[in-house]
Amino acid sequence: MVDQKRLATLDIIMNGLMRRYKERVPDVQGIINAMIAEGVIRSEDEIENDHVAFRTMGVPHLGIASLEKVFLHCGYEKRDMYNFEQKRVTAYWYAPPTPKYPRIFISELRVHELTPATAAIIHRYTDTVTSDPVDALDLDDGHQVDAFLHAPLWRTPTLSDYLALAAESEFASWVIYNRYYLNHFTVSVHNLPKYNTIAEFNEFVERHGFKLNDSGGKIKVSSDGNLIQSSTVAEMVDAEFDDGQGGTVIHRISGSYVEFAERRVLPQYADVPAPSREHRRDGFEAANADKIFESTYSAQTAKRAADEM
């Protein structure tokens, strides 16, 4: 039995996440507007959000073990684990309480695998968190949870620390500044009336001037061929850093991006006339996600910046 009170809380949390995400990532509204202009959708309410993603630090009191409590409380179920060896990242995905809601993907940097100097930078910030902050929340209060997900967990980093982290792990530098900021949301293209394959939707996106992540190719395909994904390159945003001398300094960094997913109908349901979510490929694919992570990496954002000059 789905707890309606908890679903109401989840609505508040999701609406808060998406509102702030759209404010910071103009590509979101730009793509939505293009879809409406071409008659793909009549309003953004017709878009199915396949999943949203968060990045975390694997340190005491934080990481997956902390953040997942918010969503488990709202009825999500923890599913598969993924290991990104080269990026030193672990991730899990979470199935929603009803198909109305997106899947959740939470990744965590294995800080202990970084060089001692880089790990020490991270701990200078995260060690100020001395207990699990989620435990102090009323998880039935959606507004309180929403405010928490957009509040700083540690002090603003210095630019020198940010750059030092980026030199070893761009995942680390993204999280040290953005904390729990929503990393991306995902358009389910297979449910669209047209442009409902990744190949077609990519062509539509590029025709409207948006830059796609080409790490591993613009189209990422799972080993079984049933999960096809792509993503934009993150937009650069002006970020305010501590200058280490009591003031601030502005530096442009990668923000968030938009992902697109095509989940094909599984062979055993090929004859279903109107397939729904349970008939399609579920879960994620580590090889796909590994390359999509790089939508915020400098190798991709530099190409976008070059195109916009």
Image: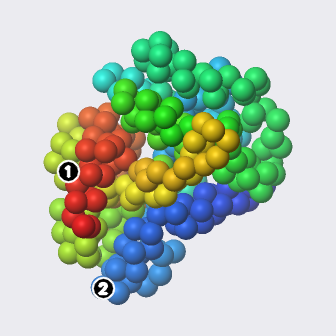
Disc 2 crowd rating (10 Å Cα; few below 14, some 14-19, many 20+) is: few
Residue 235 drawn above or below residue 32: above
Residue 27 drawn above or below residue 251: below
Q: What SS does tag 2 mark?
A: loop
Q: Position of residue 102 (x, y in %)?
A: 51, 54
Task: Identify the residue under disc 2.
Answer: 38
Disc 1 crowd rating (10 Å Cα; few below 14, some 14-19, many 20+) is: many
Q: Which mark is drawn over residue 127?
A: none
The residue located at (22%, 54%) in the rendering is 303
Q: Nearer the viewer, residue 295 or 34?
A: 295
Q: For marks 2 and 1, give the one nearer the viewer.
A: 1
Q: Position of residue 182 (x, y in %)?
A: 53, 51
- Amino acid carrying label 1: it is Asp
The residue located at (45%, 73%) in the rendering is 29
Query: Is residue 179 in sight in this rendering?
Result: no
- Amino acid carrying label 2: it is Glu
Question: Upstream in the sequence, badge 2 or badge 1?
Answer: 2
The residue located at (63%, 38%) in the rendering is 245
Query: Is residue 153 in sight in this rendering?
Result: yes
Q: Nearer the viewer, residue 153 or 259?
A: 153
Q: Which mark is drawn over residue 214?
A: 1
The residue located at (55%, 50%) in the rendering is 249
Q: Position of residue 135 (x, y in %)?
A: 78, 32
Q: Quadrant of residue 308?
A: bottom left
Q: Quadrant of residue 169?
A: top left
